[in-house]
Image (tube, rainbow, N blue to C red):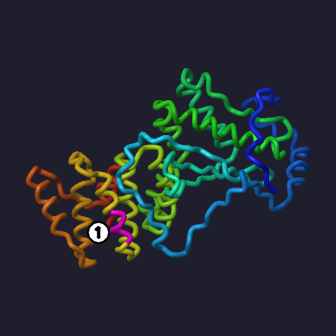
Amino acid sequence: MSFIRGSRISQGLKQVLDTEEDVQDHFLAAEEEEFDSFHDNLTLKIENQEVSKPKDDRKSAVISISGDNPGTRGVIFEVIKAEKASEGRSSFVKYTLSVSTEGDPDKTPGLIEKRYSDFSDLNTKLKKQFPKYMEHISFPGKLVIGNFTDETIAQRSRAFEQFLTHIFTIDSLRFSDEFKNFLYQEEMQKGVESIHGGDFSHCVTVMEKYLPVQERLQGDQHTDVVCTLCVLSVCHQKLGDRETALEYAESALSCINNDQTCPFLVPLLNHTIYLCWVLCREKSHLEARLAGLRDKGGKSEELLSVILNYTKFDSVWYDDK
């Protein structure tokens, strides 16, 4: 079942705003009947767009980042799919959100899944933290009944896109922890936690999923993005995929460019030189760069130690190489 994007939010949409308490229990029977009428395998595809499935080839998962996005480009938020889901007695719609960059159609968009309560929670937190900025940003209220109709989901999808786009245009909101947590930060922190427990494979899955979203929000020259690339390089190294580890290390270096204040630069150069040595790659230019930094007092630390310190985790458990 699909619907055409032409169904836009009407100014006269009748909404019944909830109190902070969830009214779902009061209308559970009616909502379940409405929800079941969708069909057990319901997936609504916005504009008939298909989400491309990642290939099994490990190489295809490498996120290409070259350090040419300082973070000033516009970002497009688009709900491309909505599907039913259940959790216990609770029924909800899961929205797949695409995060892409204007003027860069060839780059794979970041994809995240959210439900209405996630958007509502973000709205509540931002209103509390930034009441003046949020005063004129509209949010689609929850309906007493009718939350699972095609029309409501179509209208909400468009409203969510406008809601996020408006937030993105205001720097204080765009770079707030609340917005970053909603898009990627909380999940990435869990990825780092899995490194702390030695689960490098899980960390790779999480970081590669959310890196495109992080890069679009902050720009690939941001230290946080460099950190994520370093995490991916170290994880792939620990998993025995040194080729991919080197690709991510080189991407991180390209994002750092000539920023000698970056805390990852010296340990990343050491890490990259080691990978080049193992893979029999040319490394003299990296060694010369590292020597110049050491002459200026650059500290030589293990890359993962710097990562875990940057992300506020203890690194004493780590045995390098």
Please state the horizontal and vertical placement of residue 182, each as a whole percent of the image: 56, 44
Please state the horizontal and vertical placement of residue 11, each as a whole percent of the image: 76, 27
**Quadrant the C terminus occupies:** bottom left
For disc 1, the neighbor class at 10 Å (few under 14, some 14 to 19, many from 20) is few
| Residue at screen point 51% across, 75% down | 57
Q: Nearer the viewer, residue 311 or 169?
A: 169
**Taking 29 as reference, is 261 left or right?**
left
Please state the horizontal and vertical placement of residue 56, each as a whole percent of the image: 55, 75
**Taking 278 as reference, is 244 left or right?**
right
Q: Secondary structure at mark 1?
A: loop
| Residue at screen point 38% across, 58% down | 229
Q: Is residue 285 above or below residue 144?
A: below
Q: Is residue 87 visible?
A: no
Q: Nearer the viewer, residue 4 or 24?
A: 4
Tell me if residue 211 is in the magenta stretch.
Answer: no
Q: Is residue 221 above or below residue 292?
A: above
Please state the horizontal and vertical placement of residue 164, each as a whole percent of the image: 59, 38
| Residue at screen point 81% across, 52% down | 89
Query: Mark 1 highlights which residue?
Result: 320
Q: Nearer the viewer, residue 110 or 34?
A: 110
